[in-house]
Image (spheres, rainbow, N blue to C red):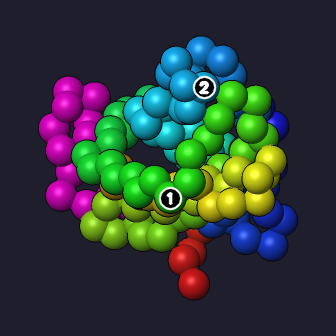
């Protein structure tokens, strides 16, 4: 996996991956649930740019959970395909929303798009009604 950041835009991160054999079904097509794993890899790269990786969030006394996840599949990924997964911060209030685009670089086709919504809790699991101010302070402004 290679993670890259867009210098001009702190709201976007990319990861490049080669589809591994163990992500494929007997037809050598990626099983649909693995797309969320690819989303997570890009989301982690995005949040790390804002010092909000899992360890950072825990050190702040918080936990961050996915409360909603969606994926729309548009073209299959296959074994060995090179892919680019883009994560883009699209909202920070009341909750953090990240949009995704998966591009099959081998076949020059868009393969999927989706989003996740992240909520923040305290260390005991009590949900905040909106993203806490100190978490917001680390996130970039959305244009």
In the rendered image, which residue does mark 2 sit on? 28
In which image quadrant can residue 80 be found? top right
Q: Is residue 131 magenta?
A: yes
Q: Quadrant of the C terminus?
A: bottom right
Q: Identify the main secondary structure in magenta.
A: loop
Relative to residue 81, is residue 7 drawn left or right? right
Q: Is residue 67 magenta?
A: no
- As drawn, the label of residue 74 is 1
| Range of residues picked out in magenta | 120-135
Which of these two is toward me, 79 or 118?
A: 79
At 16% from the left and 38% from the top, the residue drawn is 126
Q: Is residue 36 above or below residue 93?
A: above
> Where is residue 35 drawn, in percent x and y?
50, 39
Q: Earlier in the sequence, mark 1 or mark 2?
A: 2
In which image quadrant can residue 91 be found? bottom left
- As drawn, the label of residue 137 is none
Which of these two is toward me, 69 or 80?
A: 80
Which of these two is toward me, 52 or 73?
A: 73
Q: Is residue 33 visible?
A: yes
Q: Residue furthest front?
A: 27
Q: Quadrant of the N terminus?
A: top right
């Amino acid at each position: 996996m290679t993670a890259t950041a867009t210098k001009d835009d702190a709201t976007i991160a990319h990861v490049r991956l080669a589809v591994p054999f163990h992500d494929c079904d007997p037809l050598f097509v990626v099983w649909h649930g693995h797309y969320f794993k690819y989303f997570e890899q890009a989301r982690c790269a995005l949040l790390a740019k804002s010092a909000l990786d899992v360890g950072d969030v825990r050190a702040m006394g918080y936990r961050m959970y996915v409360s909603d996840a969606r994926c729309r599949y548009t073209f299959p990924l296959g074994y060995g395909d090179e892919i680019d997964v883009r994560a883009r911060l699209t909202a920070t209030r009341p909750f953090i929303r990240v949009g995704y685009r998966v591009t099959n670089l081998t076949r020059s086709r868009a393969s999927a798009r989706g989003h996740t919504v992240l909520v923040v809790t305290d260390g005991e699991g009590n949900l905040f009604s909106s993203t806490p101010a100190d978490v917001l302070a680390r996130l970039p402004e959305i244009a």
